[in-house]
Amino acid sequence: MSRTYLDWNATAPLRPEARVAMQAAMDCLGNPSSVHAEGRAAKAIVEKARGQVAEAAGASGADIVFTSSATEAAALALSGQGFSGSDLEHSCVDVWTGREPQPLGSTAQQLANNETGEVYEVAEGMGFSDAVQAFGKIPYSFAWSGAERAIISSHKFGGPKGAGAFIIKQGLELEAALKGGGQEMGRRSGTENVVGIAGMGAAAEAAAKDLADGVWQIVEQNRNVFEERLLNEVPALIIFGRDVPRLPNTSYFAVPGWKAETQVMQMDLAGFAVSAGSACSSGKVRASRVLKAMGHDEITAGSAIRVSIGPSTTATELESFADAWLAEYKRFKARREGK
């Protein structure tokens, strides 16, 4: 049975450009901190990627600190800083933020929600912004974002897993959480993941080109056609964030009472990979914390699934998913009505 991947917000497929860059980096022997020719060659790979990420992020190379993930980047940015945030934040950010304004007056705000896809305006002077889901899908510039710190994750825009970046405004001090050799300008010690960083840089450059070429506008059109079909056939359907700015690829919806876990399993058996929201939940399907924070009841929050697509997703694939999902919906409706 062929399979269709519709879970791009969890992780995007590896871009060909990233694969090529990583394969080339694998042949580089040196440690980036070594001063001999082999070390300088490895360092050149890291610095090229730093420039690629900075260019795509609207930042300078000196702003970019490579990490192992967005989770590590968030810990580096937020630990001990006294930031406040909302219940909508991703768990890797939420764990470091309080609910009440802190004495420092700093706040944290995501640029785009990983579940609903809703896009938020980041106010000037915002202490921290989670740009993980937004980066590569909508125009983004750290310089004009208004935030003093931001995080991004390689595998969300077609780079490899295990690479991320913390972006920090020049002039701000940062105490390294990982101390040792003083790599990454003394901000994050540990030998750099040259292969992963090379892939991240190439992916960032390719993602920026896709945005400039209008690729995500086509993604949005396909998403909207898909949603219109579901709404026409299922009047009880709730599509979250449909009337506010959203990422072009995200459709998060629910039929209250039809458990998300059941839907995800049914679609998996039918050959479609979708999710019930954040992938960072240890493989468990729970009622959406985000939807409950938005005021939805437990039943609705436990019934939502997320379809997230990308440039390689075809209209035909979405039609096929809709066919399969609607067939299961009819069975669910019949059972609920006792037919």
Image: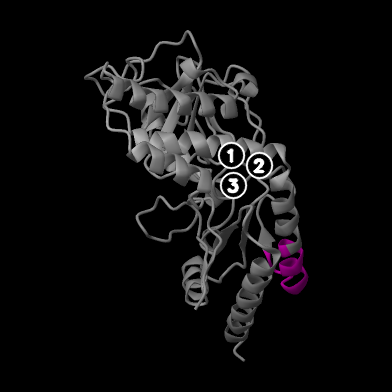
Which residue is under mark 1?
206
Q: Which of the 4 image quadrants contains residue 183? A: top left
Instruction: Please say if the residues under marks 2 and 1 sit with CB atoms less than 8 Å apart.
Output: yes
Nearer to us of marks 3 and 2 is 2
Q: Residue at x 55, y 71 (%)?
A: 258
Question: Mark 3 vs mark 2: which is more N-terminal?
Answer: 2
SS for tag 3? loop
In this rendering, does residue 83 appear at all? no
Identified by mark 3, the residue type is Met
Q: Which residue is mark 3?
A: 294
* Residue 181 vs residue 230, the one in the foreground: 181
Residue 132 image point, x, y percent = 52, 38
Q: Within 10 angstroms of label 3, few (less than 14), some, or many (20 or more) residues?
A: few
Image position of 273 (left or right of 192):
right
Which residue position is annotated with label 2? Answer: 210
Position of residue 260 relative to residue 170, above or below, is below
**Residue 259 pos. (x, y %):** 51, 69
Labels 3 and 2 touching (C-beta < 8 A): no
- Mark 2 nearby-residue class (10 Å; few <14, some 14–19, many ≥20): some
Amino acid at circle 2: Asp
Q: Which residues are magenta?
A: 226-237
Q: CA distance from mark 3 to mark 2?
A: 32 Å
